[in-house]
Image (cartoon, grey):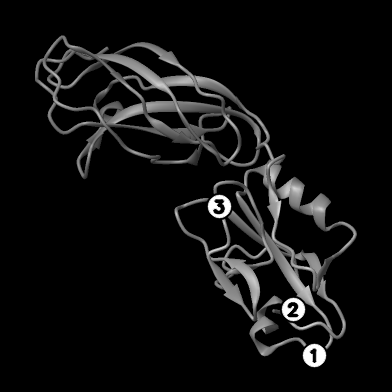
Amino acid sequence: MPRGPLAVRWLAYEPARVEAGRRGHWRIWFENAGGAPWRELKLSYHWLDERGNAIVWDGIRTDVGATDRGEAVAVEPEVRAPMPPGRYRLAFDLVLEQRFWLAELGNEPLEVEVDVEPRDASAAVAHLPPEVEPAADWHERVRAAHEEGYAAVGGSIEGRRLPPELAAYAPAGGRNPSFDAPLVCPSLLPPLEPNDAVAGLPAWRPEGGEPWLYDGRIRARLRSGRRPG
């Protein structure tokens, strides 16, 4: 461990339950082991694969607060888990914004092996009004996407004489990470609720940083002769 002005000694940690794509609060104890007080440092993290390659770099920041030399602190960082489920390494480090990470000064980050579990999809709500009929595999595909880590899942809408507002939702292709329209008739994990409407159908426009998915293979049909309310 370096003995320069900025040095950290990791003392202990208490993990949160880790589900893909979901936020959780850890608890980390560490000590200012350097020769200078801390005034602007923040605790953050990276997700790495088993070989140390970055999967998610530069996570959510948590203020450490003013910390004198030799002082120990306890911080409860909010951590969003990576996707999909699997085994990862979670590396905590301290950062001085726009300057450096303490690991760049020779400090060892706190690295923890983590098994990321599938996200719990049991509370998902399908916002399918009576005039929209899901395909036979709709629920299966949606559940799999939620368990992969997505909090909001939407797909395509087909039918005869669709309103022009639904043209962007014609079945085609698979996942579209650059889809720029709201998710229509989505499946949402609490506390998410529809926050928009398209052609009278419930919709969710991405907000709050929650992971979302549009997949054209998730199909629903506007029933013949029915118009959105």
72 horizontally vs 210: left or right: left
Mark 3 vs mark 2, CA separation in Å = 25 Å
Quarter of the rendering occupied by the C terminus: bottom right
- Figure quadrant of residue 86: top right
Q: Are marks 3 and 1 in contact (CB under 8 Å)?
A: no
Residue kind at label 1, given as amino acid type: Arg
Quarter of the rendering occupied by the N terminus: top left
Estimate the x, y position of residue 94 in percent, counting from the top left: 28, 29
Query: Which residue is drawn at the image coordinates 34% and 19% (left, top)?
Result: 108
Query: Which residue is drawn at the image coordinates 48% and 41% (left, top)?
Result: 56
174 horizontally vs 149: left or right: right
Q: Report which residue position mark 3 lands on.
A: 192
Per the image, label 1 sits on a secondary structure element best described as loop
13 horizontally vs 161: left or right: left
Residue kind at label 3, given as amino acid type: Leu
Residue kind at label 2, given as amino acid type: Ala
Estimate the x, y position of residue 141 in percent, counting from the top left: 79, 53
Q: Is residue 119 visible?
A: yes
Q: Are marks 3 and 2 in contact (CB under 8 Å)?
A: no
Q: Report which residue position mark 2 lands on.
A: 170
In front of the other: 94 or 101: 94
In front of the other: 132 or 18: 132
Q: Is residue 172 visible?
A: no
Residue that extends furthest to the right in the rendered view of this protein: 136
Q: Report which residue position mark 1 lands on.
A: 161
Residue 107, compared with residue 63, is above or below; it is above
Q: Which mark is residue 112?
A: none
